[in-house]
Image (cartoon, rainbow, N blue to C red):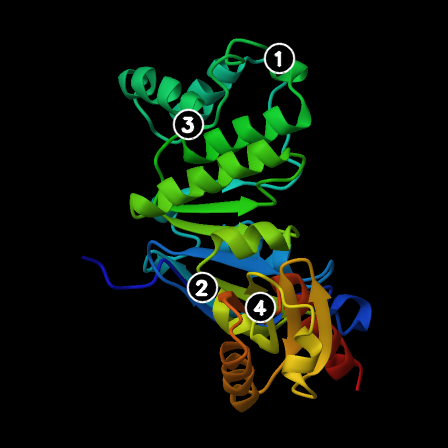
């Protein structure tokens, strides 16, 4: 089994316009280093202008780096052989409107090197997978935004690539469609493919990605697993049955930020205070049905990191 990373980026930079008429240029990507393991679902996050699209273009060989290096599946990103093993769904993609879904997939499959016999079996499978079987013979011009996004996802997977790069894959897709996309990505992971997702929908990224990297002004400001980027807040939600009318008296002055709700309460507690809280409730004969440690969600963590990164760049 190949142990090299699916994507490897080392000190990669891209400067636009440097040297033109004496200009210093605009740095879109600034010495980015990251690795994406094979079989991983990896999220690329950042505000507009962070350099995400430029980084993706360099990975695909669509833009040349100013310095640094990048590899896909152990080979330089410009290698045509490795490009055949990559699927790509660009943001705001435009597919031939005069073709049907089936015709488009057959065309793109042949462009990716698939044989006609292989496509006869593969096209119906992929249409079923993305929920587009019933619309397969309609012209793409008749598709809604969500349908266009689904058929675009199908073309990125038609040749069963080892690496799939998805730029805003759930853009314009309804909640049911987003759940279907999550299921598709999970299926890709299960067959060993690597999925690299660039998305603004942080709730989706939180549900689907193993690791994420956050970029601000061309730099990586944080990388890690979702759990590492969404730390506990120190606030706990208690589910009780029944809720005693003298709950506040039982707890006394323990913790901070007490907030009652229909089935219990929330409270800010240290580790020691958490034990004391449970002891007090037990001593009062209160049945504790559940205790949930509140965490920052990815959106909250993202906003904090972006603000810190922007302030650091400005100072």
Give me the residue at 46% from left, 26% from top: 108
Relative image position of residue 40 (x, y in whole percent): 38, 56
Residue 226 to residue 281: above or below? above
- Determine whether label 3 and label 4 are within 8 Å by CB: no
Quadrant housing residue 91:
top right
Query: In the rendered image, is residue 85 in sight?
Result: no
- Determine whether label 1 and label 4 are within 8 Å by CB: no
3 vs 4, front mark: 4
Query: Which residue is under mark 3?
Result: 129
Disc nearer the start of the sequence (2/3): 2
Q: Secondary structure at mark 4?
A: strand
Task: Give the camera-side residue of 226 and 289.
Answer: 289
Disc nearer the start of the sequence (4/2): 2
Report whether 310 appears left or right of 52: right
Q: CA distance from mark 4 to mark 2?
A: 48 Å
3 vs 1, front mark: 3
Q: Secondary structure at mark 3?
A: helix
Badge 3 local density, few (<14 within 10 Å), some, or many (20+)? some
Badge 2 local density, few (<14 within 10 Å), some, or many (20+)? many
Query: Which residue is under mark 1?
Result: 98
Query: Which residue is under mark 4?
Result: 238
Q: Quadrant of the N terminus?
A: bottom left
1 vs 4, front mark: 4
């Amino acid at each position: 089994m190949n142990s090299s990373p699916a994507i490897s980026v080392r000190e990669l930079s891209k400067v636009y316009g440097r040297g033109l008429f004496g200009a210093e240029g605009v740095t879109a990507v600034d010495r980015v280093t990251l690795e994406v393991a094979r079989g991983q679902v990896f999220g690329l996050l950042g505000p507009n202008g962070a350099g995400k699209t430029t980084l993706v273009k360099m990975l695909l060989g669509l833009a040349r780096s100013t310095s640094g290096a990048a590899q896909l599946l152990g080979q330089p990103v410009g290698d045509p052989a490795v490009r055949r093993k990559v699927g790509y769904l660009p943001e705001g993609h435009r597919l031939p409107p005069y073709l049907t879904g089936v015709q488009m997939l057959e065309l793109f499959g042949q462009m990716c090197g698939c044989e006609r016999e292989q496509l006869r079996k593969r096209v119906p499978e992929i249409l079923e997978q993305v929920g587009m079987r019933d619309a397969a013979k309609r012209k793409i011009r008749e598709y809604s935004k969500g349908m266009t996004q689904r058929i675009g996802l199908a073309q990125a997977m038609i040749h069963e690539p080892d690496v799939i790069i998805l730029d805003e894959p759930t853009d314009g897709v309804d909640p049911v469609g987003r759940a279907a996309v999550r299921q598709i990505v999970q299926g890709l992971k299960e067959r060993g493919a690597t999925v690299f997702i660039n998305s603004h929908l942080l709730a989706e990224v939180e549900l689907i990605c193993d690791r994420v990297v956050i970029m601000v002004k061309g730099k990586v400001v944080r990388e890690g697993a979702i759990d590492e980027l969404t730390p506990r807040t120190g606030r706990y939600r208690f589910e009780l049955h029944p809720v005693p009318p003298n709950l506040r008296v039982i707890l006394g002055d323990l913790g901070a930020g007490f907030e009652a709700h229909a089935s219990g309460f929330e409270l800010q507690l240290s580790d020691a205070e958490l034990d004391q809280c449970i002891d007090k409730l037990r001593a009062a004969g209160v049945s504790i049905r559940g205790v949930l440690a509140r965490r920052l969600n990815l959106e909250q963590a993202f906003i904090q990191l972006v603000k810190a990164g922007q302030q650091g760049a400005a100072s």
